[in-house]
Image (cartoon, rainbow, N blue to C red):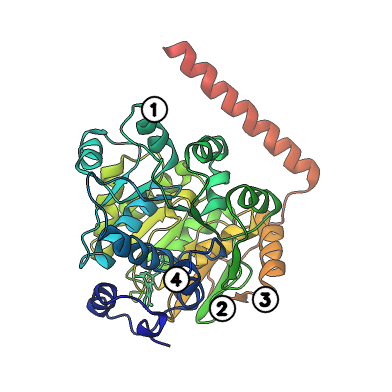
Amino acid sequence: MTFKELNLIDPLLKALQDKNYVEPTAIQQKAIPQILAKRDILGSAQTGTGKTAAFALPIIQLLHTDHSQEKGRVAIKSLIVTPTRELAIQIHENLEFYGKYTRLRHAVIFGGVKQGSQVSALNRGVDILVATPGRLLDLINQGYIKLDQVKLFVLDEADRMLDMGFINDIKKLLKLLPTKRQSLFFSATMPANIVELSDKILTNPVRIEVSPVSSAAETLQQKVYFTNKSTKKDLLFHILKDKNMDQVLLFSRTKHGADKITKNLKGAGIQAAAIHGNKAQNHRQKVLSQFKDGSIRVLVATDIAARGIDIDKLQYVLNYDIPEDPETYVHRIGRSGRAGETGIAISLCEPEENPDLRAIENLIRQKIEVADNNPFPQTDKPMTAQEKKEHNKEKQQKKQAFFANRKKSR
Ligand code: AMP
């Protein structure tokens, strides 16, 4: 199938040609005709499937056709809400590219930066607005944004949105949108609370599903190294001796862990940087572009920060820890081997994480290959329930002592 067969207009076909896209991806083939037919969509799809173009292309087309008849001030006709700044910026970049042969105006707003330039862009007039929930509501409250002309509403990465605690923001937002509108709802997973939310937003939607969350990309090779907590660091250095691994996205469960790993890597002369919620927006953008251009070899990310990062041809994903939630594993490894590329996902598993690894294998219905050539094999035994209890108690006490000391020294 070609993009032309999807009945896309020439300005879009030309932009797609500039991008060298040959064939629409599965979600694009399914979603574009339905969106052009003005249907609501309930889409289960994760990043890496071509989801952004699947909604961006038809939105541009519907508004472009409409735009030609419009007179007067430009009002926001499409609102795309997405949970993270990185995603918002990427969606906006995509819109700019796909829409470059149209006269539609786009803007992106997100928190963590001053609002001045965002407000100026809004004042110039915007057809399509990409936003994260907090800043959006903030600027609505300040009177800079009106949603009464919105015809097309997109809620992107709905599951992550709820994970990040945005449910009340979304509810507030829904009250401000016109009831007569077309809505597109995307989520990588579809647990009950997400389905319930989608019911509130969509009218008679077409359900579209591509590569469900339990299916890892077929071109992806997965490997696990069983090791000890105390040997993880050495094992990481051993793995990174492989010079083919020139661009590695490394996942850490916590921000603190991400900083520590980054420090260790830098200490060993490996170019690395961390990306997580405590880092300023401009730092995150800078690090991301350095990673893309190859000047940073290892990008250390937490799950939330990494979600939606779009890096072409990312070959290596490294799980420094095993996520407790097995679906998080699928999201992580989904960052490599995208759009038909080969990819390798490597996981480091310490004894305490063995059950988490088994849960992942159950979810993906696949046994993960155990890496040979492991100089630091797992020798420690997982803690017994009693040991775990004591360990947690000790940890808690240490934490309390730390905060008590800090309070005293202030
Ligand atoms: P997304 O799922 O929107 O994050 O897209 C994943 C990646 O696939 C991005 O790098 C897109 O630029 C790319 N992409 C989207 N559609 C196509 C296509 N039809 N052919 C090739 N690459 C695509």
The vertical placement of 350 against 200, above or below, is below
Query: Given the image, on which type of amino acid does mark 4 rest?
Result: Ser
Which mark is in front, 3 or 1?
A: 1
Could you say which quadrant of the image residue 59 lies in? bottom left
Disc 2 on helix, strand or loop? loop
Residue labelled with disc 1: 141
Which mark is in front, 4 or 2?
A: 4
Percent coordinates x, y for residue 151 in the rendering: 42, 52
Residue labelled with disc 2: 372
User: Mark 3–mark 2 contact, CB under 8 Å?
Assistant: no
Q: Is residue 94 visible?
A: no
Query: Given the image, on which type of amino acid does mark 1 rest?
Result: Asn
The residue positioned 48% from the left and 64% from the top of the image is 38
Q: Is mark 2 within 8 Å of ligand 1?
A: no
Q: Which numbered disc flags the more N-terminal residue, 3 or 4?
A: 4
Residue 35: image tag: none
Residue labelled with disc 3: 366
Circle 4 Cα neighbour tier, 10 Å, few/some/many (<14 / 14–19 / ≥20): many
Q: Is residue 41 visible?
A: yes
Could you say which quadrant of the image residue 109 lies in? top left
Percent coordinates x, y for residue 372 in the rendering: 56, 78
